[in-house]
Amino acid sequence: MAAGYAWFLVLGSVLLCNLVKTLLPTISSFLSKVFQKDAEQEMEMRIEIQGMKQELSSISMMDEFARYARLERKINKMTDKLKTHVKSRTAQQAKIKWVVNIVYYVLQAALMISLIWKYYADPVTVLPSKWIAPLERLVAFPSGVPGGVGITTWLVVCNKVVAIVLQAVG
Amino acid sequence: MKPRFHLDLDRSEPWCTPAPSGRLSPFATAVVSGNHHGDVLERRGSPVPDSGDLLGGDTDEDMTGGLRQRAQGEVAGDGVSRSPRRGLQKYLSRFDDAMRLRGQIASVKTSQDSSSEPEELDSFRLFRVFGSIVLAVAVRVFVCKYLSIFAPFLTLQLAYMGLYKYFPKTEKKKKTTVLTAALLLSGIPAEVINRSMDTYSKMGDVFTDLCVYFFTFILCHEILLLFGSEIP
């Protein structure tokens, strides 16, 4: 028969899955920062470009054309290098986000399947069957226990309620 | 915030060529202008002078008969030539609509990938959820020993249908998805699609209320069991 707190275990699992889902972007950005080795280099390049642009603005193009042109070429070269760097960083971030999402969905699927496997024959809770007439069979699926609440029904209900609660809180 | 774009689902005839307002594809404009030019030439008649003109007044009756015949032939010819033109215009307008929809869906999809937010909880939805919670508690405490728990729920839903008009109606922009675009392009009228979508959204609301109601009922039941109350 139903374990005493099976309904609470399922509810807790669904709540945990939904909370982790809301935190996925944060996890992705954290992992991106951890795996990104040359973040300082990018910052240095930006500072250098900023400095060179300030220097360029102080030089008169008419009076010191050669120096102006040299500095401009240097700025353009550094800017192209920075763009390439940003591009590769963005691609890496997208890859990490994709991997994190895949891992999450695999873990979620595994958790749901294990819960269904565990409570396939046992209902999560039992009520007097006349309370849930005429939908006893549907509610009790797949346990088949009269008056019981099956794992699938409870999972669907919990998912919906947790989504509404998180939406209201968010 | 989910970006929304407005697709003209209110059109009763989705495949009319939008002559005054819609933009035509370059192909459509070229075909229309070419056909118009062809029409003008046909109406003016051939540039070669007719033999009747040379013969003079004796052939006036023949000419009028000929003109009538020519007019009838032109009308018949115009009818025959207009129907393929109309079919072509119809095809081109459908193609134009399809390309526009494709572009819009692509732009919506990219923004949806970046931020997927569910619908906002307006006042009526909040009222529904709150009502379902209160009813579930009341049913668990007082009513469940007498009848099924779903009977009060159905009564509540009927009450919501009546109370809906007393709540401020929020402007819900029609959300166009790939499904609605595919249904539109396959020729299903926009009105049918709108009504179906409304029905499905209402069914979704009822399902949400049912889930909240059932969850609250079970939670109350378990709390009461925990505190040692006897099942009535």
Image: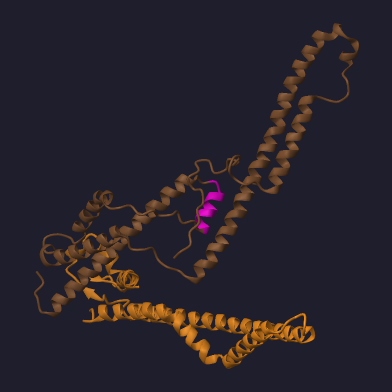
Chain colours: A orange, B brown
* Residue B14, percent from left and from top: 54, 44
Give the total number of marks visible in the rendering: 0
Determine the residue located farthest toward the top in the rendered image: B58
Determine the residue located farthest toward the front in the rendered image: A63
Which residue is at 29% across, 59% downward?
B123
Of A116 and B172, the residue lying toward us:
B172
Which residue is at 48% across, 59% downward?
B4
Which residue is at 45% across, 54% downward?
B174
Image quarter hosting the N terminus of chain B:
bottom left
Of A40 and B148, the residue lying toward us:
A40
Determine the residue located farthest toward the right in the rendered image: B54
Q: Residue B181 in magenta?
A: yes
Task: Please say whether residue A147 is visible from this viewpoint.
Answer: no
Which residue is at 88% across, 9% downward?
B56
Task: Please say whether residue A73 is visible from this viewpoint.
Answer: yes
Task: Give the residues in magenta.
Answer: B178-187
Horizontal relation, residue A128 to residue A119: left or right: left
* Residue B71, percent from left and from top: 74, 20
Image quarter of residue A123: bottom left
Of A3 and B1, the residue lying toward us:
B1
